[in-house]
Image: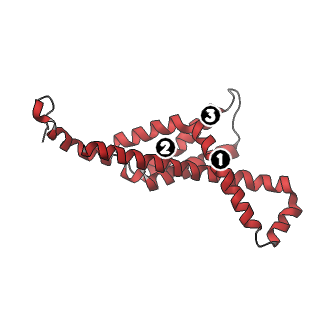
Amino acid sequence: MSLFLSILGRLIVICFGLFIALLAAAMLMSYGVSSGLFVEVIGVEALKAIDETDWGYAVLLIVWVGIGFVASFKLASFALLPIIIVIAAVEMMRWNGMVTHLILGGLASLFVIFTQLPPDAVPSEGTLIVTLAMGFVGGFFYWLIAGRGAGKWQDKLPVFREQNADDGTIKSEE
């Protein structure tokens, strides 16, 4: 029962960490999109008017967070399969280093960008930089919440094997 609760608790932490990682990556993307679009959509004069008001940056922050929250769901739909593969590998191999999570987050984001482009299209340098930054930010936030404890649930396996050794099929090698 303790192994079951350990795995269940780990899955909850993984889901929460994944949600926060996707939200952080989407916030980075929405900041990049919104900072470039605001100037084009509302114009330079209106942006200067926002600078002069006390509440202008609060409105921009609310828009930025709103775009990021909505974009995190779209990002999750594209990146779910590579992220699940990466998380399974990290958990099974007990890789809990920050650099490992940053590299795997960057690789997962590169996989997503190259699978979503048309076959003959080549992403621009800026698109690759933003994509890698999103993967690194997502990998960092996942590591911060769930990645540092990767594979901890496996510590309960020897105790579980000893408890179930009564039938003679599973024996502990200790």
Q: Secondary structure at mark 1?
A: helix
Spot occupied by residue 9 in the image (x, y as percentages of width and height): 36, 48
Mark number displayed over residue 104: 2
The residue drawn where x is 70% and y is 53% is 32
Q: Is residue 55 above or below residue 174?
A: below
Spot occupied by residue 12 in the image (x, y as percentages of width and height): 41, 47
Q: Secondary structure at mark 2?
A: helix
Give whichever of discs 1 and 2 has the lower sequence position. 1
Q: Residues within 10 Å of mark 3 (few under 14, many from 20)?
A: some
Q: Amino acid at mark 2?
A: Leu
Mark number displayed over residue 170: none
Q: Which residue is mark 3?
A: 114
Q: Between marks 1 and 3, how big is the CA–CA gap?
A: 22 Å
Q: Amino acid at mark 1?
A: Val
Q: Are marks 1 and 3 in contact (CB under 8 Å)?
A: no
> In terms of depth relative to the viewer, which is nearer, 94 or 58?
58
